[in-house]
Image: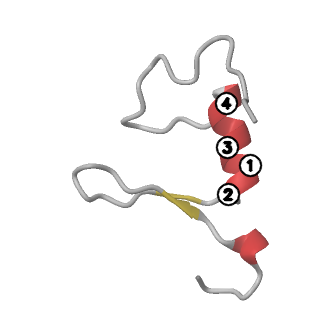
């Protein structure tokens, strides 16, 4: 973290091989991009998310 403002923090994802790729977006933008398939996350299954994702809660 290079800033006290969490809105400027990038998303970092840990892979099983211990790599730590960084995505220069906030958490909400990252999750939105993953679900809209506008952010490619190498290593994620091609079937994720499904064509009909649901949020349960």
SS state under label 3: helix
Quadrant of the frame with the C terminus: top right
SS state under label 2: loop
Residue 28 position, x and y percent, is: 75, 51
Of labels 1 and 4, earlier in sequence is 1
Q: Do the residues under discs 2 and 1 have CB atoms within 8 angstroms?
A: yes
Residue 25 position, x and y percent, is: 67, 57
Q: Is residue 14 left or right of residue 11?
A: left
Residue identifier under label 1: 29
Q: CA distance from mark 3 to mark 2?
A: 10 Å
Q: CA distance from mark 2 to mark 4?
A: 14 Å
Residue at point 77%, 70% (across, down): 7
Residue 1 position, x and y percent, is: 58, 82
Q: Do the residues under discs 4 and 3 have CB atoms within 8 angstroms?
A: yes
Residue at point 48%, 16% (across, down): 47
Residue 35 got which mark?
Answer: 4
- Residue 38 appearing in the image: no
Q: Do the residues under discs 1 and 3 have CB atoms within 8 angstroms?
A: yes
Q: Foreground: 55 or 12?
A: 55
Residue identifier under label 3: 31
Residue identifier under label 2: 25
Q: Do the residues under discs 1 and 4 have CB atoms within 8 angstroms?
A: no
Residue at point 58%, 16% (across, down): 50
């Amino acid at each position: 973290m290079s800033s006290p403002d969490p809105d400027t923090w990038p998303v970092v994802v840990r892979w099983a091989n211990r790599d730590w790729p960084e995505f220069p977006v906030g958490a909400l933008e990252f999750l939105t991009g993953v679900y809209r398939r506008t952010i490619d996350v190498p290593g994620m299954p091609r079937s994720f998310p499904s064509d009909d994702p649901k949020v349960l809660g």
